[in-house]
Image (tube, grey):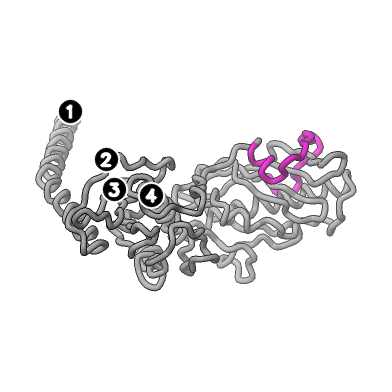
Amino acid sequence: MKSMIKLSSILAAFTVTACLCLALVYQLTAPYIAANEARALTKGLHQLFPEAERFDTLEDFPVSKISSISFDGAYLAVAGDQVLGIVVRVTGPTYKSSTILVAADTERKLKPLVFIENADTPEIGTKTAESPFVDQFTGKSLDDPFSLGDDLDTISGATISAKGVARLVQLAGYQAGEYLATNHGAAEGSAAAPIIKEAAPMPLEIALEDIWPGHSFEDVSSEVSNTIERSVVFDSAWIVRNGTTVSGIAIQARGQTYKASTVLVGIGPDRRIAGVRINETTDTQNYGYVMVEPEFYETFTGKSVDDAFLVAPTTLDGDIDAISSATVSTLGVANIIKVAALEGSRYLAEAQGGKAGKVLSAPIVLNEIPEQE
């Protein structure tokens, strides 16, 4: 007993000592870290507006209305009595996160981007700070759509990072342009304020309306069952109508992903996916959680119920691309959608005059999800 007390005392002493050491290290290094950040900011400001004589901190610059994106500072570039433009330091989610200096002149044109920090995957997501991707923003109008595949080229294998950077630049640039126009007589914009949706699971009622706007929903949960895979659980099911016409069936199903997720699957009478929305997920932020992004779940829309729903590259002929660094999450979502789609289309064919498909025979081939520690 005495030896246990002695051991506990020694461990407690080590813990206290370690905490004190960490606190001391922080106190000693914090000023140097702050000084380095200040130097990086000053260097970036002068890089963007080398002709500026001073940079005035703007205390009245608007705050971001997007909770995941922050404006960490805004600086007015001035030469003599002439306002040259604004630099906004913006931080927000890319694949992980990035902090960027976004500068706009009085003609609503962007200066080159300056990355203060980029925590995305090295040599993949960090390519957003490199040519040729980053060069696209120089001279770009603040009124452009900033849409990948439209006025911006993406980066293969780093679409999420590229989209995140475009979102940060668009939001910060728009606010910079509006501030200059309102307070310093700069050119006014021709585009509406950017609408940036925060990626998040979609509540059931909103998801139903999002897939089938203006339709009615009749609960048929007691009539739809899962006979394919017991690891996928059907919570509810609804027949979807437009007036008296059956438009499809919606099934809310849950199952294993990396952790667990609940998915709303819409199936049309033509045996095609009408839409998919993620209602809940406990998968890892910035990895499996990316399933809540429309760029992922909308890839299922229009797919035939009879497609394989197998995930590449775990299957050579897979027809579903895995989320980068979140293959297990993708395997699970694909399984949930496939099971719900097959059972939903069978119900539509048998009870609502939907298109008939192949007779389901066991075993149905699903993605194999490896055991997680």
Label 4 and label 3: CA atoms lie apart by 15 Å
For label 2, the residue is 59
Label 3 and label 2: CA atoms lie apart by 8 Å
Going from the N terminus, do you reach mark 3 or mark 2 first? 2
Q: Which mark is residue 74?
A: 3
Q: Which mark is residue 181?
A: 4
Q: Amino acid at mark 2?
A: Glu
Tell whether 289 sits left or right of 344.
Answer: left
Nearer the viewer's eye, disc 2 or disc 4? 4
Task: Evaluate if marks 4 and 1 touch, with contact meaning CB atoms under 8 Å apart.
Answer: no
Going from the N terminus, do you reach mark 2 or mark 1 first? 1
Q: What is the secondary structure assignment of the residue under circle 1?
A: helix
For label 1, the residue is 5
Quadrant position of residue 125: bottom left
Magenta span includes 357: no
Going from the N terminus, do you reach mark 3 or mark 1 first? 1
Task: Evaluate if marks 2 and 1 touch, with contact meaning CB atoms under 8 Å apart.
Answer: no
**Which residue lies at the image location 54% right of the left edge and 51% below the top edge?**
293
Q: Position of residue 367 (x, y in %)?
A: 62, 58
Label 2 and label 4: CA atoms lie apart by 17 Å
Q: Amino acid at mark 3?
A: Ala
Q: What is the secondary structure assignment of the residue under circle 2?
A: loop
Q: Position of residue 40 (x, y in %)?
A: 20, 57
Q: Position of residue 153 (x, y in %)?
A: 49, 68
Return the residue nearer the eye: 317 or 182: 182
Going from the N terminus, do you reach mark 4 or mark 3 first? 3
Q: Amino acid at mark 4?
A: Ala
